Amino acid sequence: MSPKMREFMGMNKQIGNREKGMGFKTITFHQTLHLCRFILDFGAAKMFDTQSEESHHIPDKRTAKRTSQQQEEFDSEVAIKKHQRIAVSLGHEEVQGRKRWHYSRGFFDHSDRANKDVSEPFQPKLSGVRVKFWINGGVMQHKVFSKMKHKELYKYDVGTLDEINSTLHDVSDVLDFFDVYSEYKVYDQRNENHRQTYRAAPSYKGKAHNDWAMFDLRTPDNPTLDHVACHIKCFIDLRNLPMDSEDFEFEAGMYALVDVGHRNPDPNEQGLCDMVEPWMKLPSKVPGLRDRFHQMQLVNVKRLLCPAIVVADLDNVNPRAQMRLTPRSLWAHMFEDWLKAPHTSDYDDESELE
């Protein structure tokens, strides 16, 4: 592990070169060299972690700012407000399920209380802003049902409206209308609260909010698309389709309209970093929309696997290029593999790292 710490410090100086202040001539940076010896002397790193000591005074500083700032009453006001803050914090923890403690009788047993933060199992559901779409005289119309402010700003882009219009005409023989929602909620035990919300709204708190997620898009012709990053544009409720109908390419259910991502084929983008994966969107197949919009697909939410963190690759000359962050659940395994791998850089002079 010691050579890896030296390699880590060298990479840190190359990638995040600190030019202001003392640069890397700090105790925090230098003590990284001694981390291996500390682990041998004191055990796991959490046994000598100073994070809590660095941050324990922050709540008291906030409390002090909420006083009258008068010198004569400053000490007493800080003491009173600090006591009140602790009482509120204990009450909040008790509401969340923490056992109460009594001075002479110890803890009260509240094990029979249900944890309000953890969801009970529930069926997947659509929620959020509802938009009703229907056809009148051959023209698609819609109405937004919501109590949100500035409802007039809730407008889908042209590419999304074109796909909704196409879907609406496909089912118009059996459905007079369908609803489009901004949220999809599902029970997911991988989260601490056992629930996961996917959001796709053209206007949420003043700006567009469209989540990314991983979908299983495998087909008999292409069985490799088992984990595809997709940008969700909206959720369409097609549960009212006839269950026994064979006239449609999709069955009754809840669907997500997504921009489909594809692995970036550029060889120069491959292997740049283990923490991100290069992805990209493809241009729309609709004539006139290729320059501004992307290729879309209607996918059953049963194929939704998990959330994804994807950001635009701003340094890429291709405006459709994206970067997907490697899931956090894999970081520990990646770090372990890195420690076991032969180190790639040799830093013999310790003075360079001091």
Image (tube, rainbow, N blue to C red):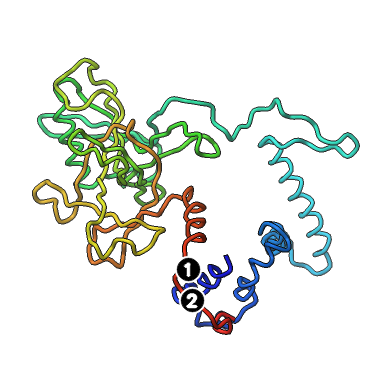
Along the viewing direction, whichever of 65 and 97 lies nearer the viewer: 97
On residue 96, the disc is none
At a point 30% along the width and 68% down the height, the residue shown is 315
Q: Horizontally, is 172 left or right of 87 in the view?
A: left
Query: Around disc 1, counting alpha carbons within 10 Å, would you say few (fewer than 14), some (14 to 19), or many (20 or more)?
Result: some
Mark 1 and mark 2: Cα distance apart in space: 8 Å
Is the Cβ of the residue at disc 1 closer than 8 Å to that at disc 2? yes
Q: Quadrant of the N terminus?
A: bottom right
x and y percent of residue 330 in the render? 46, 50
Q: Can you identify the residue that label 1 sits on?
A: 343
Question: Does the rendering let one see residue 62?
Answer: no
Q: Position of residue 313 (x, y in %)?
A: 31, 62
- Per the image, label 1 sits on a secondary structure element best described as loop
The residue lying toward the viewer, choosing from 267 and 347, is: 347
Say which of 204 and 313 sits in front. 313
User: Which residue is under mark 2?
Assistant: 346
Residue furthest to the top in view is 244
Quadrant of the snapshot with the C terminus:
bottom right
Q: x%, y% of residue 78?
A: 78, 60
Q: Is residue 29 left or right of residue 269?
A: right
Identify the residue at image location x=66%, y=59%: 45
Which residue is rendered at x = 27% and y = 45% of the image?
Answer: 155
Is residue 192 at all visible to an observer of this figure? yes
Counting from the top left corner in percent of width and height, residue 235 is at 31, 35
